[in-house]
Amino acid sequence: MSEILAFTGGKRSPGKTCLALNTAVALGSIGASVLVLDMNSSAENMATALGLRPLHDLNDLVWGYCSAEEVLVPYGRNVGLVALGEPIGWNSEEKLSRFLSLAPLLDRTDFVLIDSPPEGADGLLTVLGGTAHVVTVVTPEQVANAEALIFIMNLNRITCGKHIYLILNRSFSSEISELTCNRLEHDLDKILGIPVTCLGYVPDEPLMASAAQAQLPFIAMSPESDTSSCLAHVAGAISEICGSQQQAGDSEKFLRDLFSSVQNDKQLSVATQDGLGSCARFSDAEPEEVELFRQIILEALDPNKADSLDFATMYQHVRAVVETSRGTKLEVADFPPLAP
């Protein structure tokens, strides 16, 4: 049974698709079999990035124009790509049965990497609810202006508290990257009670644009570079985490949820028997909240002040701002407990 991982990212193109692709190639290079499920229907999807025009996609499979094997596009060593296409008329048990024929393909694959829909797009909720692991790509700019924090808060609610794995992309130096990753792991847990682990960082690589222009994974174009070493480190961290936790996904259930999401053309509350239907999404943050969170994170990332931070006081400030901006009194149960 495969490990199902969803690659997510917030606004302003943090590099989600690029890192999902390079991670797949890196995992394939160490002998793992990888299926990349391209659920990004925008013009910046993975097939377009690679200059591929698949003969068949998931819409063809659902309508019976091809088999599950034919929808798979082999790419490089041990990697296959499945494209979404333009879903039309996914509205019958017969079409669902054809869609579920993908399950054996997923089950005999070591890793299924999903290039998730963009933030706020249809189907994001179900994709995240059905995966064993959630990987979020953030940039230093998103960390500095609190976009990353707000996005991670939303993910925490959507996934009902699943552990979130971070990749810091386009980082400026190894020293700053390591410090940022350490502070994010420590402070997100202390301030918001959100379990996160940083898988690693990827430098701000000028040649990444050249690889995109050549429609190649960077790790294949420049395998000996420091950036490729960082990408390989991320892939190794994913392999290690999946191997230790053994949280392989239920392929058929995941496919059923995914089919329902596409069929209804809206974000769905996934199966309530799993407890996911009761998880409400955060509404958009008020400007006051964003500014406070920005100040907290910027201060927390300062190594000269980090050890002296009063997280309990910060936490109370966060509560006060939320209550004031919402105009409602929030129950204590809505917040994680303070760290001792």
Image (cartoon, rainbow, N blue to C red):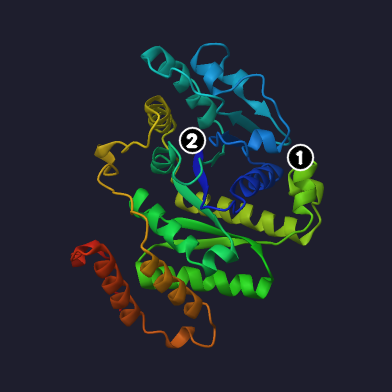
Q: Could you tell me residue 175's position as x and y percent?
A: 66, 75
Residue at point 50%, 73% (across, down): 183
Q: Could you tell me residue 324's position as x and y percent?
A: 25, 69
Q: Amino acid at mark 1?
A: Gln
Residue at point 37%, 37% (across, down): 267
Q: Could you tell me residue 210's position as x and y percent?
A: 80, 49
Residue 339 showing in the rendered view: no
Looking at the image, residue 36 lies above or below residue 71? below
Residue 249 in which image quadrant: top left
* Number of residues whose C-alpha sits closer than 10 Å to that of mark 1, classed few (under 14), some (14–19) or many (20 or more): some
Query: In what quadrant of the picture does the C terminus appear?
Result: bottom left
What residue sits right under mark 1 in the picture? 215
198 relative to 285 in the view: left or right: right
Q: Amino acid at mark 2?
A: Met
Looking at the image, residue 179 lies above or below residue 220? below
User: Marks 1 and 2, Cα distance to the nearest angstrom?
Assistant: 31 Å
Q: Which mark is residue 174?
A: none
Residue placed most toward the observer, 322 or 231? 322
Q: Could you tell me residue 242's position as x and y percent?
A: 51, 49
Label 2, secondary structure: give it.
loop
Looking at the image, residue 64 lies above or below residue 183? above
Which badge, 1 or 2, is on the more N-terminal residue? 2
Q: Which mark is residue 1?
A: 2
Label 1, secondary structure: give it.
loop
